[in-house]
Amino acid sequence: MTLGGLALAVGILVDDATVAIENISQNLEQGKELEQAILDGTQQIAVPTLVSTLSICIVFIPMFLLAGVAHYLLVPLAEAVVFAMLASYFFSRTLIPTLAKYLLRHHEHMGGDVESMKGSRNPFVRIHLAFERHFEAVHKRYRGFLEAQLDRPGRFASLFLMCCLLSLALAPFLGRDFFPSVDSGVIALHLRTKTGTRIEETAALTDRVDQRIRELIPRGEIHSIIDNMGLPVSGINLSYNNTGTVSTADADVLITLSENHKPTDDYIRELRKRLPQEFPDVTFSFLPADITSQILNFGLPAPIDIAITGRDVRGNRALANHLLEKIRRVPGLVDARIQQPSDLPAINVEVDRTKALQAGFTQRDVANNLLITLSGSQQTTPTFWLNPVNGVSHNVITSASGKADILGALASLSRGSRDAVVYHYNPQTTINLYATTERCNLGAVSDDVQRIIDHLACDASNGMRGRS
């Protein structure tokens, strides 16, 4: 955004120096000595240019009052413009007069300079005279056109208003995006296979996907492909992850293209079309790869986020599935998916408390023993043994009681499924639907999605909130 601010103000930055040089030249044409012309020319425009500079800077002051992501996004732009304008004014009052004194020390009064330069063989002088000649011709034609229009102000005003009204016909074709797309040469692909898949199977699947990507994108245009599968070891790493990884069935594929590559969006469209056909059991979604899109998405893996909150967990899931079918039909909306999968394989253990008490076990004893058997006592009563030989500590598995019994004699076991991850908005559970756009502006797609949400919200008691 700093470079954007400089690009925005580059034309204005030149104005201060241009005005200073023009005014010095005007004083020289009046017959003044060089030093006096510089002093008078600089003094005459000091206050007007200061007022104009401050007026431009004041326009960007409200940006400093913004909050949230807009503050971090637009404040660097405002700072770049303000500081550049102040620096431009400072140098136009100090550096420009100093350079004028040294560069114009052999300057002669402008009385007959133009006539004397016509016979010069200097190529720069000839280019200057040719430019002045053509510019003067354009200036005369423009002056004549302006005088003709001022003679008939009614006709000119009618023509101007007609052009303004005709331009309103373009309003339905105008897109609404917060920021133009950026071709960063990076593709961020997220894939999710069947929930509960082992990390080894996910790695093998990701290898096959990588191989297919290398076939679809020419070898000379791929710089590198980096895969990151499963959950990170530390929860700190997971808190900084914004790709939507929730289990060992998830994988992130980061594709970096070489410098001389074709448009990245073309490759994304090709991969979005081909990969689901060849890997039907895998859900593919393309995430924001550049820093600008990530900031505008507020750290989410998609620009469109629909959150369903409510006390009825099963009703939330049914509403989310129904809504997912609806929004997939919206033109320009792609990569629609439910963030929280609900098909994680599970074994339901229903303990018969009467039998357990007769055998001398409580519900807590059964749960602790089952947890120790499957995960180890690190979850319940962590115990460590320090090896005196090498000083390495080892986790020791402990049992909850000295008694032993078969779990099948105290409980009934059945297969089922459950949520792989649970999100909360305040105290209530939340289901998120993510989606992005393709070849369509975000505003139009967001309006279509909002109409669907409003229609379903009238028939549902669940709370829905959307952000795009």
Image (cartoon, rainbow, N blue to C red):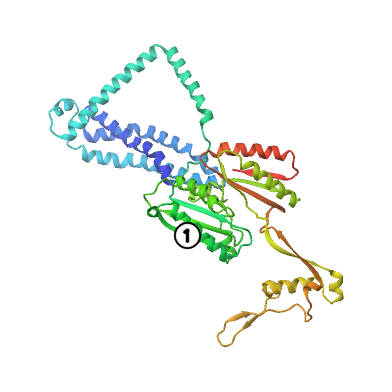
Q: In which quarter of the image is residue 384?
A: bottom right
Closer to the camera in the image, 87 or 151: 151
SS for dot 1: strand
Tell me residue 63's x, y (percent): 51, 41
Outermost residue on the bottom side: it is 389
Q: In which quarter of the image is the C terminus?
A: top right
The mark tally for this picture is 1
| Image position of 431 with respect to 139: above or below | below
Mark 1 belongs to which amino acid? Answer: Ile
Tell me residue 285's x, y (percent): 55, 50
Q: Is residue 320 left or right of residue 153?
A: right
Closer to the camera in the image, 80 or 326: 326
| Image position of 60 with respect to 137: above or below | below
Neighbours of disc 1 within 10 Å: few (<14), some (14-19), many (20+): few
What residue sits 25% from the left and 41% below the top? 99
Can the viewer see residue 72? no
Closer to the camera in the image, 23 or 280: 280
Tell me residue 445's x, y (percent): 58, 38
Tell me residue 323's x, y (percent): 67, 44
Closer to the camera in the image, 247 or 92: 247
Q: Name the residue under label 1.
A: 226
Q: In this view, does 99 lie to the left or right of 393?
A: left
What residue sits 84% from the left and 69% below the top? 353
